[in-house]
Image: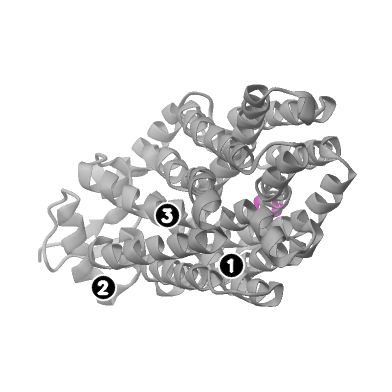
Amino acid sequence: MRDTTTDVGALLDEGRWSAYQKLLVAGTALTIIFDGLDNQLLGAAIPAMMREFALPRPAFASVLAAALFGMVIGGFLGGYIGDRIGRRLTLLGSVISFGTLTLLVSFANDVTTLTALRFFAGLGLGGAMPNAAALASEYVPVRRRPFAVTLTIVCIPLGGTLAGFTGALILPAYGWRALFLVGGTLPLILAALLWKVLPESPRYLAREKTRWPELAALLKRLGHDVPPDAAFVDSHERAVARASVRSLLVPEFRGDTLALCVAFFFCLLSVYTGTNWVPSLLTSAGFDVAIANYGLTAFNLGGVVGAILGAIIFARLGSRVTMLAMTAGAIGGCLLLASVPIGDQSTLAVLAMLAWTGGLINAVQTTMYALATHVYPAGIRATGVGTAVAFGRIGGVASSYAGAWALESGPSQMFALIAGTLSVVFAALASVRNHIPRQQTIRAAGSMATEPAGR
């Protein structure tokens, strides 16, 4: 009797990275561009909202906190649901959710309504990222996984860069309502397009016997010839119990889970302190609204470059050395910004310092997603990433208040605060045991994993 068993793990991890796979990663990454855009529109709009509502800056701390608190819950639920019902459905549902609610923000007339809308938008924003990370990692060969995940999640600061440019173009001429109208419409258009063309994760499909015909068709599109009646296994992923937070705390994963949660908490506290309050910091230092939004752009755009370079360096040095070096560089940049009066510097000098510091902070944050997808196997990957990110969002909630307090105390206090939180990130990342190894090590491990099948 003919054996039709096909090892999905061997096909994916040792196969080539085809043009179609690159398109799938690009489609997934587009959802995160709009996630980053919608996430950071509020920071760009706060100065204009302050004028329209005649309210001081601290009045908007609760609005910022509500969005981030929604992301905490969305991260937990999104990762769990993605492991249960599929990454694709959960990701696109999240995009539709945050797009719709961002659109509704353009009709808000008071802070209470803003707070409620941003909380529910946060559920979708939080649920999108763990599923995007899981999808990107499971579309590609294992040797390309860190780069694919980083390329996807780097779209958070890329979306933030787009928020800065969009704010600079729209706010002076059309106001903050038009900004949220555009920011809500674009993700809905994207979700409609991806609903037809974006497939489910092949590793998720391998676990669902009823969806094996769908998996066979997808593998053919990926360039693998499999029989229509094939049965599927995945020898390259560890078998785990049904996805739950408890499964992240078994002895095999407990130490790295705790370290990742601490690292995400303090890193996202640092990131959101910067992205939520940089425009306000610059306007209070005497810069106009357009320059303040370009400051946000510089803070994020440096992260796009830094994260991609970091993912490339992973192949040569592994994630431990790379991520610790980037964190140390970010701490140095914060200490420099804390030591010089922002208002006395030229516009170019301020933007350059923000690009360096924000670039490294965002690079560390972005590459942590690649690290998290490496730590956890496919059965609990979205849950693991979602849990770590949810803890990060709690740090983001804290940043709404910590950033407001630090900014009222002076710009130097804000960057001193970020330097301190990044020091904790450095210690947490140093304690992670299962870092991404150098690419040569990954290839050797892959060869050992597939050797028995070739005998």
* Residue at image point 18% right, 63% down: 216
Residue 264 as seen in the image, left or right of residue 334: left
Query: Above or below — where is 421 with respect to 394?
Result: above
Q: Is residue 35 magenta?
A: no
Magenta portion: prevailing SS class: helix
The quarter of the rendered structure image containing the C terminus is top left
Image marks 3 and 1: residues in contact by CB distance under 8 Å: no
In primary-sequence order, the first of circles 3 and 1 is 1
Give the percent coordinates (x, y) of residue 206: 31, 65
The CA distance from mark 2 to mark 3 is 19 Å
Q: Which residue matches tag 3? A: 237
Q: Could you tell me if residue 428 is visible in this image?
A: no
In primary-sequence order, the first of circles 2 and 3 is 2
State the extent of the magenta-drawn residues as a range. 254-258
Mark nearest the camera among 2 and 3 is: 2
* Residue at image point 70% right, 72% down: 111
Element type at mark 3? loop
The CA distance from mark 3 to mark 1 is 31 Å
Q: Which residue matches tag 2? A: 211
Q: Is residue 257 magenta?
A: yes
